[in-house]
Amino acid sequence: MFFEAFMLLNNLFKYYKKPDEIFVDGGASISDFIIERLSKLAQVVIVRSECSEAALLGAFFIAGLGIGWWDDAAEIQRNIKLSKVTSFYDENCLLLEKYEKWHKTL
């Protein structure tokens, strides 16, 4: 799974400036195994929310803003908690060799 995610990121990095951080959510973001390897391959810091289902949380925040529960977007940002920043830089990443072998088999 992290090879597929890296392939997508690698293609994006060809056309857009590589970011300092990548924010992730969803079920796979819970897995330290996946996130650590993605960070190693992409050589970026991975930031994830306390809530793995951030899309659902985003819908909640937008609805709350619409009905006046939240005063403004700044109040929403103060309520978002980032639980973990993962940075696993590895100059001699063996995963890159494995990725390249995997990519050739496609």
Image: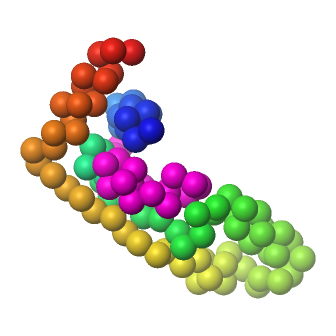
* Image position of 79 with respect to 20: above or below: below
* Image position of 14 with respect to 49: above or below: above
Specify the farthest residue to the top. Answer: 105
Identify the residue shown where x is 32% and y is 59%: 45
Closest to the observer: 51 or 59?
Answer: 51
In the rendered picture of this protein, how many numbered marks are placed on residues?
0
Q: Give percent across and percent down for residue 59.
A: 76, 63
Specify the farthest residue to the right. Answer: 67
Closest to the observer: 9 or 103?
Answer: 103
Specify the farthest residue to the left. Answer: 92
Residue 21 in view of the camera: no
**Residue 95 lies within the magenta run:** no
For residue 74, which quarter of the picture?
bottom right
Range of magenta residues: 15-38
Q: Give percent across and percent down for residue 78.
A: 59, 83
User: Quick one: quadrant of the N terminus?
Assistant: top left
Identify the residue shown where x is 59% and y is 55%: 26
**Residue 26 lies within the magenta run:** yes
67 on left or right of 22: right
User: Quick one: quadrant of the C terminus?
Assistant: top left
Specify how the rendered protein is coloured: rainbow
Q: Give percent across and percent down for residue 17.
A: 35, 43
Residue 60 in view of the camera: yes
Identify the residue shown where x is 27% and y is 43%: 41
Q: Give percent across and percent down for residue 33.
A: 36, 54
76 on left or right of 101: right
76 on left or right of 83: right
Identify the residue shown where x is 83% and y is 69%: 63
